[in-house]
Image (tube, helix red, strand yellow):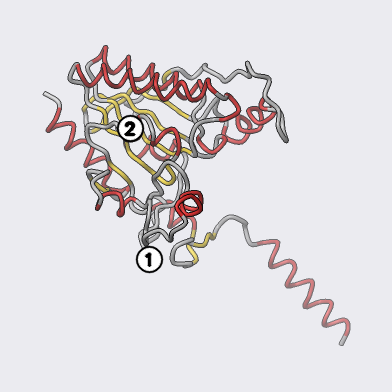
Amino acid sequence: MAWFRRKDKNIAELGKKNIPSGLWTKCPTCTEIQYKPELDKNYSVCRHCGHHFRVSPAIYRELLLDQGSFQELFGNVKSADPLKFKSGKKYTDQLETAMSKTNQNDAINCYSGKINGKRIILGIMNFEFIAGSMGSVVGELVSRSIDLAREEKSPFVLVCASGGARMQESALSLMQLAKTSSKLARFQEEGGLFIPILTDPTTGGVTASFGMLGDVILAEPGALIGFAGPRVIKQTIGEDLPEGFQRAEFLQDKGFLDHIVPRENMKEMLSNLIGLLVS
């Protein structure tokens, strides 16, 4: 009997080793187990409840821009550490880890490309890079993108995903709020079209600056959008918060958003808006 038990155990262990990892994931909203290849085919949106999983900038790029139409911009800009910041970990070490993990230089990628034949400048933030925090590089690349859109008279579309300003750069990161906001003001005064797309999560300094300054503000379903987090607000005011507080649907109901657009329909919505609003 002992020999059979050992044999059964070895067969079971062999079966486990032959099952590839990363094929299944659980939806955090409805808890349904998702087959990853099928989830990817559906733009990383749960077929059961419509939950929008976070995706990489490359997915948004492929989803929004016409195939073969795009060119990456400002790819050589990297963060420095002028304050020599150190907490539990050196800022330079955090940057190196994030660069290695994401294979990009900072929390944003910028492109020149087309949406259904209409030329745009596109920025895509990456939450995987130090929580998508806005430091001097993010502010600089957003500013450069606005300048380029202004020169080309092209719409500027920005996919936002951020935990807020990057405190490792202290006041330098907070200065980006004023820098980007002033650039946008000039761009819009001259007739430029700016459309931010707020994804989960868009919080802190990004919400307090360019995230909420669009001519038309779009959001993905269920996205967390706000300045401070719900826990901090609840502790501050000492009251329970309304159901769905700081979710895209709540903000649209209160007039902070124009449209909530499922991921699969985002390209068509942008194309229609640009067709209507750009002469």
Residue 279, disc: none
Residue at image coords 48%, 50%: 236
- Classify mark 2: residues with Cα within 10 Å, few (<14), some (14-19) or many (20+): few
Residue 67, disc: 2
Q: Looking at the image, do the residues carrying marks 1 and 2 touch, with CB atoms under 8 Å apart?
A: no
Q: Which picture quadrant has residue 69? A: top left
**Nearest-to-viewer mark from 1 and 2:** 1
Given residues 180 and 18, the one toward you in this image is: 180
- Classify mark 1: residues with Cα within 10 Å, few (<14), some (14-19) or many (20+): few
Q: Position of residue 173 (x, y in %)?
A: 51, 24
Residue at image coords 44%, 67%: 30
At label 2, the amino acid type is Gln
State which tag comes first along the sequence, 1 or 2: 1
Residue 48, disc: 1
Q: Position of residue 119 (x, y in %)?
A: 24, 24
Given residues 35 and 46, the one toward you in this image is: 46
Given residues 124 and 38, the one toward you in this image is: 124
At label 1, the amino acid type is His
Q: Secondary structure at mark 1?
A: loop
Look at the picture and state if 256 lies above or below 240: above
Residue at image coords 62%, 57%: 20
Quadrant placement of the N terminus? bottom right
Determine the CA span between mark 1 and mark 2.
29 Å
Look at the picture and state if 52 lies above or below 133: below
Q: Position of residue 263 (x, y in %)?
A: 32, 47
Q: Position of residue 211 (x, y in %)?
A: 35, 34
Left or right of residue 193: residue 143: right
Identity of the residue furthest to the bottom in this view: 1
